[in-house]
Amino acid sequence: MSVFLDPKEQIEIIKDNVDDIVPEEELLFKLEKSFNSKKPLNIKAGFDPTSADLHLGHTLLIKKLKVFQELGHKISFLIGDFTARIGDPTGRDKTRPPLDEDKIKENSLTYEKQIFKILNKKNVDILYNSNWFNKFDLKEIINLSSYGNVARILERDDFKKRHKSGDSITLTEFIYPLLQAYDSVHIDSDIELGGSDQRFNILLGRQIQKAFKKEQQVAIFLPILEGLDGKLKMSKSYNNYIGIDENPNDIFGKIMSISDNLMERYIDILYPEKRDYFNDIDNPLIKKKQLACELINDYNDESAAKKALENFDKTFSKKDFPDDIKLVEIKLLNKTIIDLIEELTQNSLTRSEIKRLIKSRSIQLNDNRNVELDFIPLKNETYNIKIGKRKFYKAIFN
């Protein structure tokens, strides 16, 4: 495809799997203008690197960027390394903890690497908003703040709830939407993509562009992908995500753990073009396996998908222990099984959670599920350890 495709054909392709376009008539106008001038549109999508690695929720936006890229337009992949110091307050019930610059930089590098699992490198600009905000002086901040309206911001559900309950809302959180909006001014974006929860921020971008006498961007809103819990949106903060750079076995296991209803939702949102194919699969278990293989094939390759399927069948269907678990050495030092599991999982489980898992026979040492709370492993003995349904470890205690 190219930018010379008829604008009405382009808009039909763009509208697929989209919640809303504001305003749609302006999108058609911009596409016609681009078509007549042979000049590609500037398509913006912003990502704050508040955590490492992109997840499936991010891929909805990146796949839509790919659509624009294939239509011949220019992609502005904006990494909000400056705004990440504040953190987007959208949908949050409390202030995000601040991130240090080293962590933000480390996270940003994973984004730079992983977007090209989906996008081609052609016509993609990777931008960092610290490049302009680090140069802002107090006068510019005051000027930008003058376009904000506290009453309007407090109308947002997230801020309204926090204000009503007396929870803290910082001034930096108030200014965050203005900073995101100014990004659009600085890079002259024609179109901004975002999840439907970003409606306030992206529409504010239109207002700020107008105030700065710029042509207003069109806002395109995409569906929100729920996390593994099926309730909250997918996010590393909620620990309900599937990272596109995760181990294929972990991706496979996570997909197999979701409900059948959530599986159908993932298919609808992530693979709308393959809905007929999935509809022909009657067995939910087989359908989940195929969904997991599709995802792994997309972000790794077909061989990795095949190996993950084989590993799942071997481990869960035949109840075998995986072959590729790395052996970990842990100092015994008279520690109980609770201490050792805590160390083995790098404190991802609390002591009370470990006790609960032991009591419910959800921790297995070799073939033994009847583990006592005060059990001390044998020195220099190797143990295959299974925690819950999907976590496997191999450890030697010395």
Image (spheres, rainbow, N blue to C red):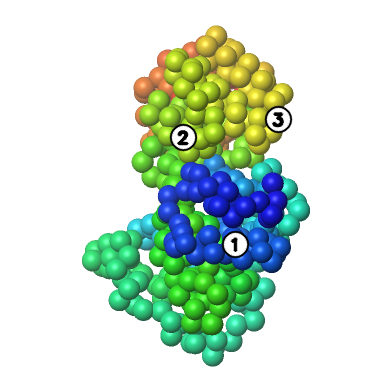
Amino acid type, mark 1: Glu
Q: Residue furthest bottom?
A: 139
Which residue shows up at 71% across the image and 57% down it? 124
Q: On screen, 242 above or below 252?
A: below
Mark 1 or 2, closer to the camera: 1
Q: Which sits earlier in the primary sequence, circle 1 or circle 2?
A: 1
Q: Position of residue 66 (x, y in %)?
A: 64, 48
Q: Amino acid at mark 3?
A: Asp
Mark 1 neighbour class, 10 Å CA radius: few under 14, some 14 to 19, many 20 or more? some
Q: Decide: few, some or many residues near mark 2? Use Cα within 10 Å; few <14, some 14-19, many ≥20.
A: some
Describe residue 114's horizontal placement relative to residue 205 as left or right: right
- Residue 268 is marked as 2
Residue 280 or residue 32, whichever sits in front: 32
C-alpha separation, residue under disc 1 versus residue under disc 2? 30 Å
When asked about the image quadrant of residue 123, the answer is bottom right
Q: Nearer the viewer, mark 3 or mark 2?
A: 2
Q: Where 115 falls versus 24 (above or below)? A: above
Looking at the rendered structure, the secondary structure element under dot 1 is helix
Query: Within the image, what quadrant is residue 82 found in?
Result: bottom right
